[in-house]
Image: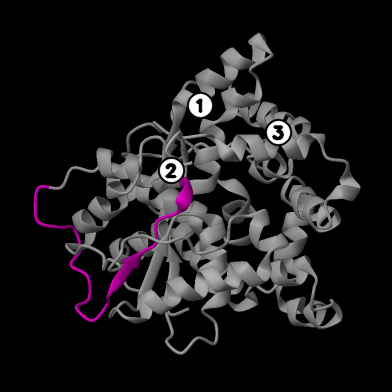
C-alpha cells in the first residue's frame, strides 16, 4: 500500500478474498488454523511454553515441508528458560519497590508472547512503569485474549470479532489508557473499529477502546522527562541495532523515531542504522508459515546488511519479529544478543545481575 501510487489497501482486498475462499482452496489451511487456534487458547499456549525443552524431539518427527516445523523451530527452550529467570528478578523488583508510588495510570495488554512464552516482557514493562514513571501496579486483566490479528489475516473475521469483543470487555471497567508492548498487537487493537462497520453498537465501543490504545515506545518516550544527557550510560562496547516492525513504520502515524528517542534518553546513544534504512525481517505472521523459503530469503538479506555494521545487539518490539530474529540468528556467522526493547531497557536500569542469555 505504501508503494502503490493510488494507495490501494491491498491487505484489505486480500483478507476480503480469503473470507470467501472455501477451506480446501488454501493448501496451508490446517497449519494456519492450528496456529490461530493455539494463539486464541491460553491453555494451549501455556503448554507450548512448557514443552520448549522437548522442541527438538518434536521437530525431528515433523516432515521438512511442515509449516508447524518452521514455527516450532523459533521456540528456543534456553531463551524461554532465561525469560522465566529474568521474570523472577523483575517480579522481585516490583514486589520490593517503594510503597509511595502514584496510583496506577495505565492498563496493559500483554499479547500472546508476553503472556505465555516470554513473561519477562510483561514484567519488564511493569517495571519500567514503576521505575521510570513511579507508578504502582500496572493493571492487566486476566480475561484478555489474543488480539485476533492471525485470525483476521487468515480471513476468519468472525473469530477476529469474537476475540475483539473479549478484549474490549476485559478493559471496559475503567477508562485508563491501554498500553501494549507488541507492535503487531498495537496495529490490530487500533484497527478494531474496522471489524464492526456493520454493527453500530460494537462500533462505538471499538472506537472508544482503540482511542485508548498506546504503543510502547511512544508512550514511554512521551512520558519520560530526562533533565540530564541520559539515565544510564550504556557500555561502550555494546552496539545497538533497533529493528523497525513493519506494523509500526507503515502505520498511519509512522512510528519510527519514538523507540530511537527513548533509547537515547536512557542510554545516551542512538542505535546503529542500516545504509538504506529499515527492512522487513520476513516474518509476517502467517506469511512465514505458508512461505518459509521466501521468509528465509528476506531475513537473510536483512542479516547480510546488518553484518556490514558493528552491531552486536538487536532490539525490537514486535513479537513476530522477535521470534524471527531469535530463531534465525542461531548458528549465523556472527552472534547477536536479541531482546525485546522493554527487557533491554529495564536491565540497564536495575542493579547488576547476570543478564547473559
Q: Nearer the viewer, mark 1 or mark 2?
A: 2
User: Badge 3: few (under 14), some or many (20 or more) residues near its Cα, within 10 Å?
Assistant: some
Disc number placed over residue 2 in the picture, else none: 2
Q: Does 229 appear in magenta?
A: yes
Sequence-first disc among 1 and 2 = 2
Magenta highlight range: 227-247
Where is 57 relative to 187, above or below? below
**Residue 165 forms part of the magenta stretch:** no
Residue on which disc 1 sits = 210
Q: CA distance from mark 1 to mark 2?
A: 23 Å
Q: Say whether disc 1 or disc 3 marks the residue closer to the N-terminus.
A: 3
Q: Quadrant of residue 195?
A: top right
Q: Quadrant of residue 27?
A: bottom right
Q: Residues within 10 Å of mark 1 (few under 14, many from 20)?
A: many
x, y percent for residue 62 = 84, 76
Is the stretch drawn in magenta largely helix, strand or loop? loop
Judge the density around disc 2: few (<14), some (14-19), many (≥20) Cα neighbours within 10 Å.
Answer: few
Viewer-side residue, 138 vs 228: 228
Secondary structure of the residue carrying numbered label 1: helix
Q: Is residue 207 visible?
A: yes
* Residue 16's disc number: 3
Q: Residue furthest front?
A: 5
Separation of marks 2 and 3 at Cα, in angstroms: 19 Å
Q: Identify the mark at residue 100; answer none if there is no mark.
A: none
Q: Nearer the viewer, residue 228 or 112?
A: 112
Residue 47, percent from left and from top? 77, 61
Amino acid at each position: 500500500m505504501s508503494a502503490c501510487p493510488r494507495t490501494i489497501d491491498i491487505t484489505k482486498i486480500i483478507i476480503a478474498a480469503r473470507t470467501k475462499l472455501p477451506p480446501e482452496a488454501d493448501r496451508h489451511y490446517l497449519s494456519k488454523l492450528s496456529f490461530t487456534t493455539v494463539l486464541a487458547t491460553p491453555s494451549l499456549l501455556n503448554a507450548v511454553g512448557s514443552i520448549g525443552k522437548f522442541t527438538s524431539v518434536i521437530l525431528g518427527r515433523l516432515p521438512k515441508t511442515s509449516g508447524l516445523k518452521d514455527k516450532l523451530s523459533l521456540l528456543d527452550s534456553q531463551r524461554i528458560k532465561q525469560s522465566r529467570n529474568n521474570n523472577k528478578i523483575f517480579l522481585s523488583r516490583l514486589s520490593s519497590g517503594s510503597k509511595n508510588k502514584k496510583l496506577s495510570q495505565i492498563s496493559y495488554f500483554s499479547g500472546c508472547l508476553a503472556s505465555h512464552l516470554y513473561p519477562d516482557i510483561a514484567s519488564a514493562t511493569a517495571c519500567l512503569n514503576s521505575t521510570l514513571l513511579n507508578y504502582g501496579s500496572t493493571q492487566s486483566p486476566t480475561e484478555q485474549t489474543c488480539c485476533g490479528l492471525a485470525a483476521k489475516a487468515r480471513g476468519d473475521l468472525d473469530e477476529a470479532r469474537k476475540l475483539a469483543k473479549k478484549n474490549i470487555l476485559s478493559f471496559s471497567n475503567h477508562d485508563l489508557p491501554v498500553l501494549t508492548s507488541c507492535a503487531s498487537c498495537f496495529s490490530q487493537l487500533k484497527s478494531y473499529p474496522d471489524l464492526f462497520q456493520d454493527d453500530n453498537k460494537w462500533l462505538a465501543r471499538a472506537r472508544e477502546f482503540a482511542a485508548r490504545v498506546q504503543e510502547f515506545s511512544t508512550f514511554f518516550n512521551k512520558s519520560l522527562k530526562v533533565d540530564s544527557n541520559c539515565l544510564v550510560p550504556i557500555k561502550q562496547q555494546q552496539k545497538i541495532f533497533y529493528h523497525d516492525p513493519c506494523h509500526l513504520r507503515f502505520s498511519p502515524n509512522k512510528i519510527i523515531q519514538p523507540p530511537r528517542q527513548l533509547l537515547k534518553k536512557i542510554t545516551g546513544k542512538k542505535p546503529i542504522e542500516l545504509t538504506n534504512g529499515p527492512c522487513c525481517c520476513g516474518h509476517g505472521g502467517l506469511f512465514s508459515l505458508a512461505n518459509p523459503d521466501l521468509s528465509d530469503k528476506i531475513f537473510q538479506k536483512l542479516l547480510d546488511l546488518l553484518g556490514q555494521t558493528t552491531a552486536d545487539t538487536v532490539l525490537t518490539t514486535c513479537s513476530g519479529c522477535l521470534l524471527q530474529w531469535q530463531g534465525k540468528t542461531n548458528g549465523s556467522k556472527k552472534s547477536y544478543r536479541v531482546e525485546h526493547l522493554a527487557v533491554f531497557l529495564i536491565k540497564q536500569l536495575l542493579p547488576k545481575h547476570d543478564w547473559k542469555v
